[in-house]
């Protein structure tokens, strides 16, 4: 059984396309194309299920059309519409030097100066001019930190931690 911490979200399946089971795939991370993966993981009502790809083709940077094995009619494709798509961390090409934003969700953020954990990275807000990390603390509060590469000191993929250099006074706001 695939566990949630073994995968990370890379998109969502959109509407069925045509009559032969093809689906629109709203892509947030194209890791499946970079590493040549055979399958993607789909959340089926809380159960993570691998679906082997027969074919896919990109329509744009944010959208692809995908066909899965065994999904060969519009009706079967319709049953997958709206489901979230995940990728196995073990197959990812992410490293401490190159990591996608989606891959680090759920990581513990650590203050480089104090070496203390700030909380869990829950969301990356891209609605503003500058990306923001939304971090949930142990007390349930939300911290907003700029997601700038100059502030990210180190990402440890195995330990699932991100060490950040926090500008003086930022945590006091």
Image (cartoon, grey):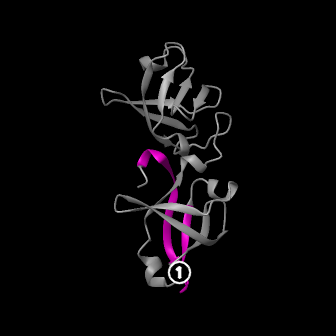
Q: Nearer the viewer, residue 3 or 143?
A: 3
* Percent x, y of residue 133: 49, 35
Tell me the quadrant of the picture where the C terminus can be found.
top left
For the record, the magenta segment spans 4-26
The residue tagged 1 is 21
Tell me the quadrant of the picture where the N terminus can be found.
bottom left
Q: How many marks?
A: 1
Q: Which residue: 33% across, 27% down?
A: 138
Q: Nearer the viewer, residue 41 or 135?
A: 41
Residue pushed farthest left? Answer: 139
* Percent x, y of residue 79: 41, 75
* Percent x, y of residue 112: 54, 18
Q: Which residue: 36% across, 28% down?
A: 137
Q: Which residue: 65% across, 26% down?
A: 150
Q: Does residue 153 lie above or below 98 as drawn?
A: above
Crowding at dot 1, Cα within 10 Å, few <14 / some 14-19 / many 20+, comes out as: many
Q: Left or right: where does residue 31 sit relative to residue 78?
A: right
Q: Which residue: 52% across, 58% down?
A: 11
Q: Does residue 147 lie above or below 102 as drawn?
A: above
Q: Nearer the viewer, residue 73 or 14?
A: 73
> Can residue 18 be found in the magenta stretch?
yes
> Can residue 16 be found in the magenta stretch?
yes
Q: Does residue 86 lie above or below 66 as drawn?
A: above
Judged by its main secondary structure, the magenta piece is strand
* Percent x, y of residue 81: 44, 71
Q: Secondary structure at mark 1?
A: loop
């Amino acid at each position: 059984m695939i566990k949630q911490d073994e995968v990370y979200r890379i998109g969502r399946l959109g509407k069925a396309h045509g009559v032969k089971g093809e689906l629109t795939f709203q892509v947030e991370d194209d890791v499946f194309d970079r590493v040549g993966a055979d399958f993607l993981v789909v959340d089926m009502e809380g159960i993570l299920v691998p679906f082997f790809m027969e074919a896919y083709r990109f329509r744009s940077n944010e959208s692809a059309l995908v066909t899965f094995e065994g999904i060969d009619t519009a009706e079967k494709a319709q049953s997958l519409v709206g489901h979230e798509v995940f990728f196995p961390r073990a197959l990812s090409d992410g490293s401490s030097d190159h990591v996608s934003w989606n891959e680090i969700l759920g990581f513990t953020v650590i203050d480089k100066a104090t070496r203390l954990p700030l909380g869990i990275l829950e969301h990356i807000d891209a609605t503003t001019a500058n990306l923001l990390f939304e971090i949930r603390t142990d007390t349930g509060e939300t911290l907003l930190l700029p997601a700038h590469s100059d502030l990210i000191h180190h990402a440890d993929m195995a330990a699932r931690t991100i060490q950040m250099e926090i500008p003086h006074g930022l945590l006091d706001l």
